[in-house]
Amino acid sequence: MTVRHDGQPAQAGPDHSPTGATWLRVHGRLLAAGWRRGSTYRAAALGGLVANATFGFLKVSVLTAAVAAGGGELAGYDTRAVIAYAWLSQALLGSVNLFGRIDLADRMRDGSVAVDLLRPLDLQTSTTAQEVGRALFSLLPRGVPILVLALTVGGMRIPLDPAVLGAGLLSALLAVVLSHLVVYLVAATGFWTVETRGLQVFYMVVAGFFAGLFVPVSIFPGRLFALAQATPFPSMLQTPVDLLSGRVVGAEAALALLTQLAWLAGALVAGQLMTRAGRRRLEVQGG
């Protein structure tokens, strides 16, 4: 206890340690900053929309032909389900980071991450908040128009059950956050290396395949399917697509959401451990 000169106990001073409310306010502003940053690249968003729509029609054509060749069903997918898969995966592609690119990797390479480490912010959560804000904005110029196009001319149908839609939207949000937390792990290897572009390319190839970007994960053969399920990648794309399309509902949907949360928590812990270890061993280009 602190005692004043007159012998009376002193009153405790204000607690300046960060609180949950402070953390939420700061990261909310970082999220908004990422949103604003994403809104400045309108031409890029338009280009992404055109590319996603083009590949959406190609995926629909190829997959519906595969379903027809399989007698009207392919690993549990009928024509309607495979169309929903194709368009929903394209709609989420602009927000879910399956490409491994993140601005932090460049700051790692040139050493400017040292400034980030001096700030009174957690590097992992602050970086992720900004990236997620930018990714969520991408849903407006890319994701929503893709869905409108699909509903208009693509033959896709979305379940109208509020519980199904709510679970699907929550799953999509978790997928976006999870993807950027995992990409942070890729960038964090820059604490020990001077170049991470090779790892980013490797991540892009593996993540896209196991997330279900090209074909649904459920049509993989047994061992390959088991390998995919042992990674966080299906939770980044296949899971939200299944929930948004109504293909997975009820107890299965709840289990899928819990799986996403488990992978998210694991990525968060891994990122914290890598950041703490990396602060003591940072390699930058030139020395």
Image (cartoon, rainbow, N blue to C red):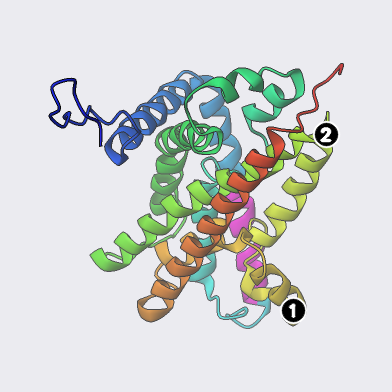
Compared across the picture, whether 154 is left or right of 123 comes to: left
Residue nearest the viewer, comparing 112 with 10: 10
Residue wearing tag 1: 221
Residue nearest the viewer, comparing 97 with 66: 97
Q: Mark 1: which secondary structure?
A: loop
The residue lying at 65 percent from left, 20 percent from top is 114
Q: Mark 2: which secondary structure?
A: loop
Q: Position of residue 62 (x, y in %)?
A: 67, 61
Amino acid, disc 1? Pro
Q: CA distance from mark 1 to mark 2?
A: 36 Å
The residue lying at 38 percent from left, 61 percent from top is 168
Quadrant location of residue 274?
Answer: top right
Q: Where 231 sits versus 38, above or below?
A: below
Q: Main secondary structure of the magenta part?
A: helix
Q: Where 252 sits versus 127, above or below?
A: below
If the image is split into quadrants, where does the N terminus sit?
top left
The residue lying at 42 percent from left, 59 percent from top is 171
The residue stretch that appears in magenta: 56-68
Amino acid, disc 2? Thr
The residue lying at 41 percent from left, 73 percent from top is 253
Residue wearing tag 2: 193
Is residue 30 part of the magenta span, yes or no?
no
Q: Position of residue 5 (x, y in %)?
A: 18, 20
**Residue depth check, mark 1 versus mark 2: number of the one nearer the observer:** 2
